[in-house]
Amino acid sequence: MGIADDLMQGLGISDPVIRLGVTGLSRAGKTVFITSLVANLLDRGRMSALRAAADGSLKSAWLQPQPDDTVPRFDFERHLAAMTGPDPHWPEGTRHVSQLRLSLRVQPRGLLTGWRGQQVLHLDIVDYPGEWLLDLRLMDKDFDSWSAEVLDRMKGRPGAARFQDVLAATDRTRFDETAAQALAAAYTGHLHEARDAGWSDCTPGRFLMPGELEGSPALTFTPMPPEFRDTPVWREFARRFGAYKSRVVKPFFRDHFARIDRQVVLMDVLGAIHAGPQAVEDMRRAMADILTAFRPGRAGWLSQLLGSRRVGRILFAATKADHLHHIQHPRLTAITGAMLREARDRADFSGARTEAMSIAALRTTTEEIIHQDGDELPAVRGTLMDGRQAAFYPGELPANPADLLVHARNGADRWLDGDYAIMDFAPAPGTLRPGDGPPHIRLDRAAEFLFGDQI
């Protein structure tokens, strides 16, 4: 909301507003989620698990101009055309904060039906990169502790050796801007390679999506090993680390994150499983940090920033459920929930509700049984990115999530008893029936959890 909307709502003279934050870790499908959610709220034929759509109390939905004049609009129409047009393809991913307002006309239920007329509820959807959310934990770290943590974590990851080579060749007796840029470029390259290989915790997040900050001193620093401590390079990088926190991270949380009412965090859990145990453990730690970010009453700067405002519900959604036959969906959901368990137990949410779910915001496959060596395998069939049709069995997820997570926590290099594969499917060509939004899996259940109680 803008300042005027905040004031009007505070005085109780405007329509109610729910701000839904949508973020996700690498390749989780934020743009597809928002596009399909909005399309399915406009045409609700596939939203039977959203109670207000099923019982008819949600009368209509329409797009309005977004309330924040300084925030880019989420390009819903272009993204929907990409997903459902005559040559369907995946839309461009999230690179900055954007927003969309969807207004819902609702008839109150129950005893209020005869006494109150229809009401309008505004759903403001705020899209932002998950990498930026992971930056929250930097606020509670000094440069020394952050450097030690990152350098220990990067061992064996893609691009780490290149960064270490550049670091070893750096003159620590003086600060040189050209050398600093070379270090930052090598470190940024490592972050890109690690993210592409399935790692989740790749901070600072703006190094991956710099926008207008590209090349600025605030994005020209790297972690430093102990032997650089108190050198000119260390002192300047420590100063820039502090500037990054105060001038990049904190304004984002103040201007956007602090006003979120409901939040969905999308995760490519299948991609992490395919990448191996270490990627799964990295995702588990990243989600723990994200949950800490939503913890009401947390001491320090975030508590002061949030004040009494709370994020009421948080959905952690494992995306790409259409890459599995439906009989494996409960296992994917159980693995996602188990990854969250420790963080949820540690955090005192003071009434906030969290949920794990497996979804596909845009269903790209059909299901079938394939026969192989006398076995019947539950598979999915879809169009690959090169246009070929293929039936695919990704392997069987374990019934007990601990079979995966224990290996991951113990630092295993590979899975002992499973070989889990993934494939990239393109959006399926098709014609939408009047009144239907794009095909999905459990998007209606996600909507019911996130804001169904308000409509």
Image (cartoon, rainbow, N blue to C red):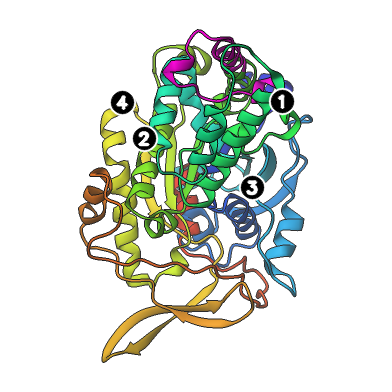
Query: Callout 4: helix, strand or loop?
Result: loop
Q: Which mark, by number, is residue 169? A: none
> What residue type is disc 1 on?
Gly
Question: Total of numbered circles in the picture?
Answer: 4
Task: Identify which amino acid the numbered label 2 is placed on.
Answer: Ala
Image coordinates of residue 16 in percent, x first then y, are 61, 33
- Disc nearer the start of the sequence (2/4): 2
User: Above or below — where is 145 with respect to 437?
Assistant: above
Residue to which mark 3 is pinned: 105
Percent x, y of residue 428:
61, 74
Nearest to viewer (mark 2 / mark 3): 2
Q: Nearer the viewer, mark 2 or mark 4?
A: 2
| Position in image of residue 303 (x %, y %) | 45, 15
**In the foreground, 299 or 313:** 299
At which x and y percent is residue 145? Answer: 41, 18
State left or right for residue 61 relative to residue 272.
right
Q: Are marks 1 and 3 in contact (CB under 8 Å)?
A: no
Locate the N terminus by quadrant: top right
Relative height, residue 382 to residue 234 (above, below): below
Q: Which residue is mark 1?
A: 2
**Callout 2 crowding tier (Cα within 10 Å): few <14, some 14–19, many ≥20:** many
Lower sequence index among marks 1 and 4? 1
Residue 288, numbered circle = 2
What SS does tag 2 mark? helix
As drawn, which residue projects farthest toward the top?
230
Q: Nearer the viewer, mark 1 or mark 4?
A: 4
Q: Residues within 10 Å of mark 1 (few under 14, many from 20)?
A: few
Say which residue label 4 marks. Answer: 348
Q: Residue at x 30, y 52 (%)?
A: 413
- Whole-angstrom CA distance, mark 1 to mark 3, is 21 Å
Q: Is residue 275 visible?
A: yes
